[in-house]
Image (cartoon, rainbow, N blue to C red):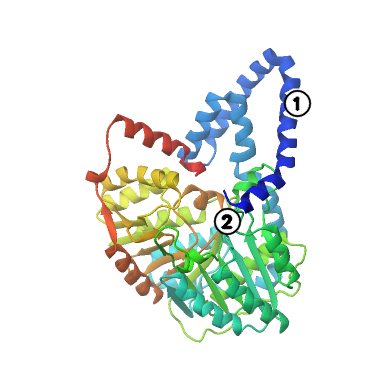
Amino acid sequence: MSKKIVLRIIGLLPAVFLQILWFILLLTFLSNYIELLSVIVTILSFFFVLYLISAREETSYKIMWLLITLTLPFVGAVLYLLWGRKSSSHKMKKKLDTTHKELLSATDKAYSAIDEIYEEDKRVGQIFHVLEKVSGFPTIQNENAKYYPVGEDMLKDMLVDLENAKEYIYLEYFIVEAGQFWDSLVEVMIRKLKEGVDVRVMYDDIGSIATYSREELEHLIKSGIRCIPFNPAKFLTMQLNNRDHRKIMVIDGEIAYSGGINIADEYINEKDRFGHWKDIGFRLTGNAVLSYQYMFVEFWNAFSEDKIAKVEFIEKQNKTHDGYILPYYDAPFFEQACSNNLYIQMLNAAEDYIWFYTPYLILGDSLTDAFVAAAQRGVDVRIVVPGIPDKELVYRITRSYYGPLLEAGVKIYEYTPGFLHAKACICDDKLATIGTVNLDYRSLFLHFECNSLFYKASIIDVLKEDFEDTISKSKERTLADQKTGFIHFMINGLLRIISPLC
């Protein structure tokens, strides 16, 4: 365990101790009324189970909580109320709703190009329409989107664009770690700060708990860079589940970067952790940048005391027209899970092929059914996952999902040179998504994520070439590789039960 994690745990111990002490005192008091409590708990557990069954949740998630509750009625119900409900992120939602209302006057003229897509392809238009409705973001004519098959290529362009910044630089990342990647960015940002550029950084507190200390944060702030950790760990609450997994860089409202790449040296292959680190990203120009600008400003103003006072989202005439793009973000308190529903719709609409990159494969029943249905009707369905794991337990859970997918005809490839951290989907040469969304429960339902859906943009052709190259370096898994027997059946079943927590 790293020194940074140990120090953070020590800092959290007083708060955790007080919470545990409160629970012990409460249970001690209630023990005097054990018989009455037994009757009350039984009745409440019955109604709780009914509530859980009727809740609009993934089946696998409900099964896990039902098993916990039926085994430990009182404890299970309390744990669910503290950790399992989406509504437990209502404090975050309230802050974001307030900021959203404040920003409406700056975004109320947002133009959507969805009618143009409907004219070309009604089924694709329906996919964009649903995503617009759920996420609240508009479909935009894409000006230019440059694809990066590895992080080291993206860093080179980032440094050039940062050097040319005139007004502001906004960064928001899940992981920040001192090293060649981060230090090179900080060096340029401090220099731009002296030129009057507004520089702001937001990073996830838990995501960076082992990589970025409070001392490093204070040093950055002293340099003049405005910086805040997102959702800092203070108490044992459900909100600890709701992490900011987004990766965003916005420069002057003119350029935006996103994708799966965090700011740490393994993402540019300067540090060898699990073989070659395969990750992807993209660079946007044009009006699509405004959506990423909005994402950052909304979060910053919701969770920072140092607000961005002057907020302008000025639409301009795109210099070129290269297909369409819908950038959006996903949140745990949305009524519908944007990305989960999007992938189901894409699988349902696929005619020839649909391929996925994901570092983790932990699917809910609805998404699993969509994969199976697409493969069974003859669609070429492929999933590329890492060949070398970064988390052994999650890797084992990922492999527990292979069997039903392979039986249905889904092709699964493991990237043999190392760890694949990319998150993307490509469908029928006309649709693609690139962003931060893993095919696991946390990304699809619990985290804040950002993603971009492309239609008939040239980046799709480049992404397909990268898929083909990556698959050529990967090992295809088959049913013959799968271990069978009662023991493996039991292990896979147990892993599937706990998979929503991983």
SS of the residue under disc 2: loop
Q: Which mark is residue 214?
A: none
Which residue, given by chain and number where applicable, does mark 1 sit on?
25
The residue lying toward the viewer, choosing from 221 and 28, is 221
The crowd level at tag 2 (other Cα within 10 Å; few <14, some 14-19, many 20+) is many
Depth check, front residue: 483 or 330: 483
The answer to whether one can see residue 183 in this image is yes
**Among the two numbered marks 2 and 1 on one chain, the one whose residue lies closer to the N terminus:** 1
Q: Residue furthest top?
A: 35
Identity of the amino acid at label 1?
Leu
Rendered residue at 70%/68% (across/down): 220
Alpha carbon distance from label 2 to label 1: 36 Å
The answer to whether residue 457 is seen in the rendering is no
* For discs 2 and 1, the disc positioned in front in the rendered view: 1
* Residue at the image point whose x is 27% and y is 36% from the top: 484
| In the image, residue 77 above or below residue 169 | above
Check residue 448 in the rendering and tell me which mark sits there, or answer none.
2
Residue 64 point in image, percent of width and height: 49, 34
175 or 436: nearer the eye? Answer: 175
What is the count of numbered marks?
A: 2
Location of residue 75 with respect to 452 vertically, above or below: above
Place residue 235 in its image quadrant.
Answer: top right
Q: Position of residue 73 (x, y in %)?
A: 58, 24
Classed neighbour count for the residue bearing mark 1: other residues with Cα under 10 Å, few (<14), some (14–19), many (≥20)? few
Q: Is residue 97 left or right of residue 62?
A: right
| The quadrant where residue 427 appears | bottom left
Q: Nearer the viewer, residue 396 or 350?
A: 396
- The residue at the point 27 percent across, 56 percent down is 475
Amino acid marked by disc 2? Phe
Residue located farthest toward the left when viewing the structure as drawn: 480
Residue 344 percent location from the top left of the image: 41, 53
